[in-house]
Image: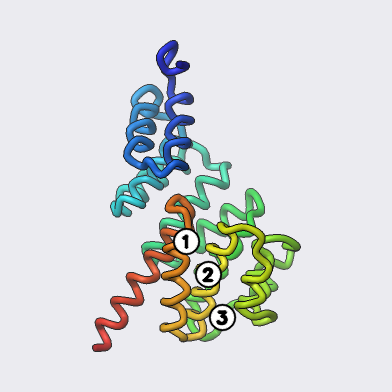
Amino acid sequence: MALKLKPNAQTFGARGVSRKLLGDFDGAFDDQTRALALDPRVAAAHGELAFLHHVKGDSDRAIVESTTAIGLAPKDPIMQRGRGYIQFCRGRFDAAAADMERSLALEFDPYAVLFLYLSLARLSGRARPDLAAVASRWTAAQWPGPVFDLLMERSTAQQVLNATATAPEQAEAYFYIGEWHLLNGRHDEAARALEIALRSLPPWFNEYSAARSELARLAETVAAAS
């Protein structure tokens, strides 16, 4: 009704987000495009389009839209995190770490800390960074806090799963368990956990796209070795 009475960028953008959360990515893409046709300076619409380009497989366009969003809203940590997640999926771990660091300078987000750590760990190889030092300014008593303990080798995968309270948390847990196996060189175990995550996660979760990307990289590694 609001769109019929007075269409505006904010209303189209809001409907686009709702459509995304219902899994209607094509409808969401159409709404965000309409929002920007009415007002091309809406950072959130550019950020949403970045995500939608990303899930459609056009990561180059996703980075362009995400960078535009950051330029329009340089103090918005959501825009920084959004580009960081896309860079992680592209395997650009240095760029992902830089974006997560900038986002954390603006606002704490435990998922940004986790992806910062995972990015730094991939860059450093066997000499992994100290997650306790990365997260030393904050405490994480609730989810995804148990994941921190797993990555610091202070708990087990089963303990992380036992700490989940909802189905989305359990799905996220499998993603981070997969990452933990991957960092420890256990590629078969990593693939199994990431496959469960991919089957279980809602497709708009950042971990969903990351799991898909990790599985593609693992498949490439197996193909190169055979």
Q: Quadrant of residue 211?
A: bottom left
With respect to residue 121, does 97 lie above or below? above
Tag 1: amino acid: Ser
Q: Tell me if 216 is positioned left or right of 209 in this view.
A: left
Along the line of sight, which residue is nearer the eye, 172 or 93? 172
Along the line of sight, which residue is nearer the eye, 75 or 16? 16
Residue assigned mark 2: 174
At 45% from the left and 16% from the top, the residue drawn is 1
Labelled disc at residue 181: none
Along the line of sight, which residue is nearer the eye, 94 or 86? 86
With respect to residue 9, does 19 lie above or below? below
Residue assigned mark 1: 200
In space, the residues marked 3 and 2 are separated at their CA atoms by: 21 Å
Check contact, mark 1 vs mark 2: CB within 8 A.
Answer: yes
Residue 97 locus on image (x, y percent): 51, 63
Residue 133 visible here: yes
Mark 2 closeness class: few <14, some 14–19, many ≥20 residues within 10 Å:
many
Identify the element where label 1 is drawn.
Answer: helix
